[in-house]
């Protein structure tokens, strides 16, 4: 009851801000006074934010479809770890036979164009053929090579012993995590069949408030503390997108998982003090600093709460200073002329 009455009286008095005011220690009589030195901090935890386990564009290997696929039978679940060369999908439909024929044709055409190119090169160098003839030979050679290379890269992933003309079995291009669209009703030529994401590319993506975006150095998700590796140079409304370092295995997070991440914000002139050390008057926060035989009220800004502590920002250095952590309200009452009680 006494503490409640004290708080009401302080509020009703409406005194001016106590910055630069002080209380002499002898005036506090038998009050139990304990002190603790603040600990300087380089960062403080902000409010939790939604984050997602994902990867940045361009970090995954895409396997595009070489033609229209009527049916895909995936042999592994999305998010699974696959080994290099492990079968992951079977493509079915009459178009698959056409794709295989196109590959064989492109190889034959590329071989023929290469032979023609090589046999005519000495003739061109000796000016035995015209510039226009050489241009036509060169263009045909490079175009056929591009087509064949495109098809060859795809068929490097095809199981060689697959003799079904209406089906192609694909293997993983690398050891990675597989991701694919389970809702796709059809796959056209050029569409993605699957993405293969290296472990080092899996990270957290988080939308940071614009006012702290460039000051966030890391985020905490569960027991993991992850450094911010890249921050977008563009904002989206009131937020800016950021990505962490690669997720270590100890984090035990799955692709696509939504988590709460607490940002660690870079701080200047910031210190960790006991919550009991901070008092409020006229909507401002203060702490008591011991200076010889005097307690001085110093204004601080509370940045965050960590357990029984506050992270506060102060315009003056608190390094090596003694901060009062007990009987704080009683000292405030003495300042206001209310006595020790």
Image (cartoon, grey):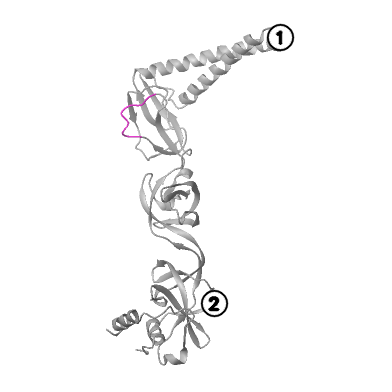
Q: Nearer the viewer, residue 68 or 171?
A: 68
Label 2 close to label 1 by CB (< 8 Å): no
Residue tagged 1: 127
Q: Nearer the viewer, residue 12 or 143?
A: 12
| Residue 215: % across, % down | 49, 57
- The correct choice, above or below, for 196 with respect to 222 in the image is above
User: Residue drawn at (46%, 39%), measured in percent from left and top?
Assistant: 57
Helix, strand or loop under label 2: loop
Residue 116: which quarter of the image? Answer: top right
| Residue 121: % across, % down | 67, 13
- The correct choice, above or below, for 105 with respect to 310 in the image is above
> Would you say 180 lies left or right of 111 here?
left
| Residue 262: % across, % down | 41, 58
Helix, strand or loop under label 1: loop
Please say whether residue 119 is visible from this viewpoint. Answer: no
> Would you say 137 lies left or right of 108 here?
right
Q: Which mark is residue 320?
A: 2
User: Residue drawn at (40%, 92%), measured in percent from left and top?
Assistant: 30
Q: Nearer the viewer, residue 205 or 179?
A: 205
User: Residue drawn at (30%, 80%), measured in percent from left and top?
Assistant: 8
**In which quadrant will I find the C terminus?**
bottom left
Q: CA distance from mark 2 to mark 1?
A: 87 Å
- The correct choice, above or below, for 147 with respect to 211 in the image is above
Please say whether residue 35 is visible from this viewpoint. Answer: yes
Residue sitting farthest toward the right: 126
User: Label 1 crowding class (10 Å Cα cut-off): few <14, some 14-19, many 20+?
Assistant: few
Which residues are the magenta region? 181-188
């Amino acid at each position: 009851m006494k503490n409640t009455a004290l708080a009401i009286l302080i509020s009703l008095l409406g005194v001016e801000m106590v910055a630069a005011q002080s209380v002499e220690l002898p005036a506090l009589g038998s009050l139990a006074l304990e002190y603790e030195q603040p600990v300087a901090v380089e960062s403080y935890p902000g409010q939790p934010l939604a984050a997602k386990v994902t990867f940045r564009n361009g970090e995954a290997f895409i396997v595009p479809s070489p033609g229209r696929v009527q049916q895909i039978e995936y042999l592994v679940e999305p998010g699974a770890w696959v080994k290099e060369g492990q079968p992951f999908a079977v493509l079915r439909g009459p178009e698959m036979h056409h794709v295989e024929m196109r590959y064989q044709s492109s190889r034959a055409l590329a071989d023929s164009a290469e032979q023609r190119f090589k046999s005519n090169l000495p003739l061109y160098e000796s000016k035995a053929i015209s510039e226009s003839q050489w241009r036509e030979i060169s263009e045909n050679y490079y175009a056929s090579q591009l087509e064949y290379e495109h098809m060859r890269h795809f068929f490097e992933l095809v199981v060689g012993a697959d003799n079904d003309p209406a089906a192609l079995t694909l293997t993983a291009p690398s050891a990675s995590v597989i991701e694919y669209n389970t809702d796709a009703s059809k796959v056209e030529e050029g569409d993605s069949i699957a993405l293969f994401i290296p472990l080092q590319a899996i990270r957290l993506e988080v939308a940071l408030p614009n006012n702290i975006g460039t000051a966030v150095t890391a985020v905490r998700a569960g027991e993991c503390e992850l450094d911010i590796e890249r921050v977008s140079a563009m904002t989206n409304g009131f937020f800016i997108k950021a990505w962490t370092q690669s997720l270590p295995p100890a984090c035990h997070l799955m692709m696509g998982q939504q988590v709460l991440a607490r940002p660690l914000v870079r701080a200047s002139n910031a210190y960790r003090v006991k919550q009991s050390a901070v008092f409020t008057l006229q909507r401002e926060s203060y702490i008591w600093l011991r200076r010889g035989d005097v307690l001085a009220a110093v204004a601080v800004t509370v940045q965050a709460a960590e357990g029984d502590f506050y992270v506060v920002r102060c315009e003056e250095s608190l390094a090596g200073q003694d901060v009062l952590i007990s009987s704080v309200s009683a000292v405030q009452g003495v300042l206001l002329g209310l006595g020790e009680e």
